[in-house]
Image: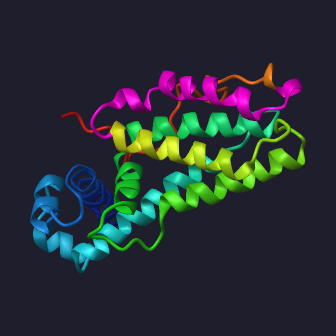
Amino acid sequence: MARQQRAVRTREALIRSAAEIVAREGFAVTSLTGISTRAGVSNGALHFHFVSKVALVEAVEAAALERLRAVLEAPAGARSRLQHLVDVTHALARELNSDVVLRAGFVLCGDVAWAPDVDLRAYWQRWAEGLVREAGAAAELRPGAEPEGIVAAVVGATVGFEVLGARDTVWLASRTVARFWELLLPTLASPGLLGTLDAGGTRGRAEPVSDGLGGRETR
């Protein structure tokens, strides 16, 4: 049992170390030696868990998808689909700021040196499309509001915050996301619903959903 626990901890350390380097440097610059050194394990231990750099980065990608699903599939406490969408964007920004594995997964989506098995940005877009369709069916959208335009604005903004947040975490701050929604909500929400919506979000403002693998690296 103790050996299994050590193996799990070693694997998690390698995934986190790989994510930290990928998030900062990209796939091409990431090296197995750099990962093992950062994780504090030998090259032999690394190769016991992962046969190649590709296999290790694929594990980062898979772990990042789990993180994204945790954000998107968390129970909705909001009373409307649009409020749920607002809440999820706040949760996603918090996780991108605090969870280096999720952040690396998004970085890999735009890395020309990497062919992702799962495009997290596209996954997020499909989820948003489904929720906006539900909002339209529930008469939550303002007359004339186009679901495609709403999704383009939301996904474009959040991915932009993710990219800019790599250098300046203010872009992932709750106030930044709230300002975006303060501008957007009046253009898309039905008049009867608009007054009930909170651009600052209503779900778990202080509680990230990530586990021990995450955490913003201090630089």
Q: Image height check: is 62 above or below 184?
A: below
What stretch of residues is rendered in magenta? 166-193
**What residue is at 66 percent from the left and 51 percent from the top?**
128
Percent coordinates x, y for residue 159 in the rendering: 46, 47
Colouring of the image: rainbow
In the image, is 158 to the left or to the right of 154? left
In the image, is 150 to the left or to the right of 38? right
**What residue is at 37 percent from the left and 52 percent from the top?**
101
Viewer can see residue 215: no
Q: Image height check: is 113 above or below 126?
A: below
Check the picture and name the quadrant holding the C terminus: top left
Question: How many numbered marks are there?
Answer: 0
Q: Residue furthest front?
A: 144
Viewer can see residue 53: yes
Percent coordinates x, y for residue 94 in the rendering: 47, 35
In the image, is 26 to the left or to the right of 180? left
**What residue is at 28 percent from the left and 75 percent from the top?**
54
In the image, is 183 to the left or to the right of 141? left
Check the picture and name the quadrant holding the N terminus: bottom left
Percent coordinates x, y for residue 162 in the rendering: 41, 43
